[in-house]
């Protein structure tokens, strides 16, 4: 995915599933279906994924995990990502031969 960010010139990036609002909505659904262990497990995993993303991802503004922030900035990647840090990370990965 990272290489595609540099190889293509994206005007907008839609990351709907990476939003705190959906975590809240998902937990409300889990509370409604209290006895559904599958939903509970998915909710825990989804919440953990976004929490760890938010804590460890230094190339994205923490506000980028809010759907409202993305909508406000019209899904413009220049407003959502720190392109300087992203490019450094991309070059490092490319140099190490991972891509």
Image (spheres, rainbow, N blue to C red):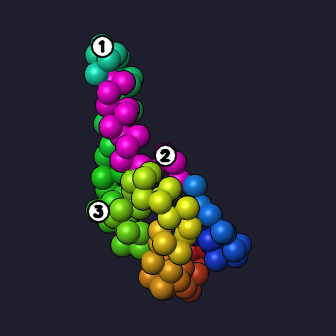
Which is the main secondary structure of the residues drawn in magenta? helix
Residue 91: x, y in percent?
55, 85
Disc 1 crowd, CA 10 A, few/some/many (<14, 14-19, 20+): few
Is residue 46 visible from the viewing direction of this image? Answer: no
Residue 89: x, y in percent?
48, 80
Q: Quadrant of the N terminus?
A: bottom right
- The mark nearer the N terminus, 3 or 2, is 2
For label 1, the SS is loop
Q: Which residue is at the front of the view, 73 or 26? A: 73
Horizontal arrangement in the rendering, residue 4 relative to residue 45 (left or right): right
In the image, residue 62 above or below residue 27: below
Q: Which mark is residue 17?
A: 2
At a point 36% along the width and 62% down the height, the residue shown is: 63
| Structural distance between the alpha carbons of marks 2 and 1 | 24 Å
In the image, residue 62 above or below residue 40: below
Is residue 38 visible from the viewing direction of this image? Answer: yes
At a point 69% along the width and 74% down the height, the residue shown is: 9
In the image, residue 22 lies in the stretch drawn in magenta? yes
Horizontal arrangement in the rendering, residue 63 relative to residue 98 (left or right): left
Residue 56: x, y in percent?
32, 65
Q: Which mark is residue 35?
A: 1
* Callouts 2 and 1 close, C-beta under 8 Å: no
The residues colored magenta run 15-30
Residue that badge 3 annotates: 55
In the image, residue 50 above or below residue 75: above
């Amino acid at each position: 995915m990272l290489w595609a960010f540099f190889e293509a010139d994206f005007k907008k990036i839609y990351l709907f599933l990476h939003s705190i609002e959906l975590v809240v909505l998902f937990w409300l659904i889990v509370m409604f279906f209290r006895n559904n262990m599958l939903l509970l497990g998915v909710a825990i995993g989804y919440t953990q994924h976004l929490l760890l993303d938010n804590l460890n991802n230094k190339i994205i503004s923490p506000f980028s995990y809010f759907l409202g922030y993305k909508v406000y900035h019209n899904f413009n990647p220049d407003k959502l990502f720190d392109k300087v840090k992203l490019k450094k990370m991309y070059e490092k990965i490319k140099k190490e031969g991972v891509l």
